[in-house]
Amino acid sequence: MLHTLSHSPWQHDISAQLRLVKAGDDLLLLSDGVIAALEGSRYLDILRAAPISLYALNEDIEARGLAGQISSSVVRVSYNDFVRLTIKHTRHLTW
């Protein structure tokens, strides 16, 4: 399943989300959700411990001026990559 997080992790119930993720799921951080990918953040540590792959939309990272602060463990993707993720996963859950 593809999960997308478009809200700031500070305004999100990450524990509820993690109860629904399964091994092999992907999480794409969009809009203010890219804040969860900040190096050293507690949210990033929580997400890295989950059995999922982490992606962040590069355009949203750049729009927020966070390019130099995003963890290298998060894969930066383009809109084309976003489309590929939606094709890969037949189910999608938005947070």
Image: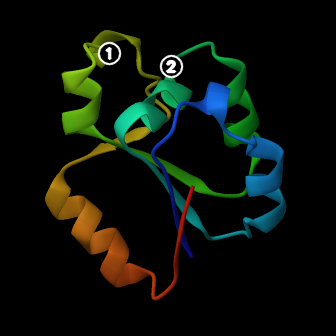
Residue at which label 2 appears? 38
Which numbered disc flags the more N-terminal residue, 1 or 2?
2
Residue 61 makes an appearance in the image:
yes
Numbered tag placed on residue 66 in the rendering: 1
| Element carrying mark 1 | loop
Residue 57's image quarter?
top left
**Residue at point 64% right, 17% down?**
41
Looking at the rendering, in which quadrant would you find the N terminus? bottom right
85 horizontally vs 26: left or right: left
Question: Where residue 85 sits: x, y (%)?
Answer: 35, 70
Which residue is farthest bottom? 90
Residue 88's image quarter?
bottom left
Q: Is residue 85 above or below residue 64?
A: below
Query: Pointers 1 and 2 in contact (CB under 8 A)?
Result: yes
Question: Where residue 14 sits: x, y (%)?
Answer: 74, 43
Numbered tag placed on residue 41 in the rendering: none
| Element carrying mark 2 | loop
**Residue at point 47% right, 37% down?**
33
Question: Where residue 26 sits: x, y (%)?
Answer: 53, 62
23 horizontally vs 40: left or right: right
Q: How many marks?
A: 2
User: Which amino acid lies under the numbered mark 2 shown in the image of this protein?
Assistant: Leu
CA neighbours of label 1 inside 10 A, class few (<14), some (14 to 19), many (20+):
some
Distance from label 1 to label 2 (Cα)?
Answer: 8 Å
Question: Where residue 25 sits: x, y (%)?
Answer: 60, 68
Way the structure is coloured? rainbow
**Residue at point 35% right, 38% down?**
31
User: Which amino acid lies under the numbered mark 1 shown in the image of this protein?
Assistant: Leu
**Residue at point 57% right, 55% down?**
95
CA neighbours of label 2 inside 10 A, class few (<14), some (14 to 19), many (20+):
many
